[in-house]
Amino acid sequence: MEIVIDRMTLPHLFEIKDELISEFDDFWTYSIFEKELENPSSQYFVALINNEIVGFAGIWKVLDETHITNIVTKISKRHMGIASKLLEKLIETVKLEKATLLTLEVNETNTNAIKLYEKYNFKKIGLRKNYYGQNNNALIMTLYF
């Protein structure tokens, strides 16, 4: 199984439009992504297996800092290394652009994601209380270059 990472385009977005909320995530809507793809400060990538979109990830760049907006794997394709490949692509992209750090928020109950970020040397640097709603805190994690 080969995972191919490619730059997200409008045709990619249209392909997953009807399954964004049910198969990927319940926050990022088609209209949000449409605007993000036009934003010169953001970059988005898709993960493909046999030309099927199985995940996506994005970053925002502000000056010399970069923020991961999301890394999402299709529910039926989780635990196959897709998120790792997407994260590696984000790190590679950020390094090429000479960013000083890469940061993100992750739900403190999402132990799989936290382990993934720790594997790539992200450090816990803070907490955002109720970031994901009532009693759902976010850990702030950062990778310094």
Image (tube, helix red, strand yellow):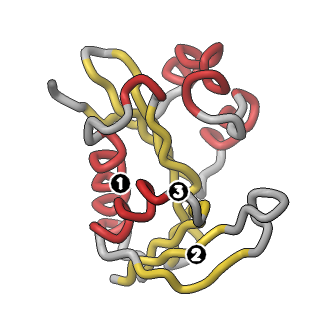
Question: In the drawing, does residue 143 fall left or right of residue 14?
Answer: left
What residue do we see at 63% from left, 22% from top?
22
The C terminus sits in image quarter = bottom left
For marks 2 and 3 on the same chain, the one whose residue lies earlier in the sequence: 3
Q: Which residue is mark 1?
A: 87
Question: Residue 143: x and y, percent?
Answer: 40, 77
Residue topped by disc 3: 110
- The foreground one among 79 and 14 is 79
Say which label, 1 or 3, has the lower sequence index.
1
Q: Secondary structure at mark 1?
A: helix
Q: Secondary structure at mark 3?
A: loop
Disc 2 crowd rating (10 Å Cα; few below 14, some 14-19, many 20+) is some
Residue corresponding to mark 2: 140
Quarter that holds the N terminus: top left
Q: Is disc 3 surrounded by few (<14), some (14 to 19) or many (20+) residues within 10 Å?
A: few
How far across and down, in percent of the image, does residue 38 sit? 65, 40
Report, in whole angstroms, how far the alpha carbon at label 1 lies from the one at label 3: 16 Å
Question: Hey, which residue is sitting farthest left in the picture?
Answer: 1
Where is residue 16 drawn, in percent x and y? 55, 18
In front of the other: label 2 or label 3?
Answer: 3
- Give me the residue at 58% from left, 75% from top: 140
Residue 74 vertical position relative to residue 122 in the rendered view, above or below: above
10 Å neighbourhood of mark 1: few (<14), some, or many (≥20)? many
Q: Of residues 79 and 61, which is closer to you in this image?
A: 79
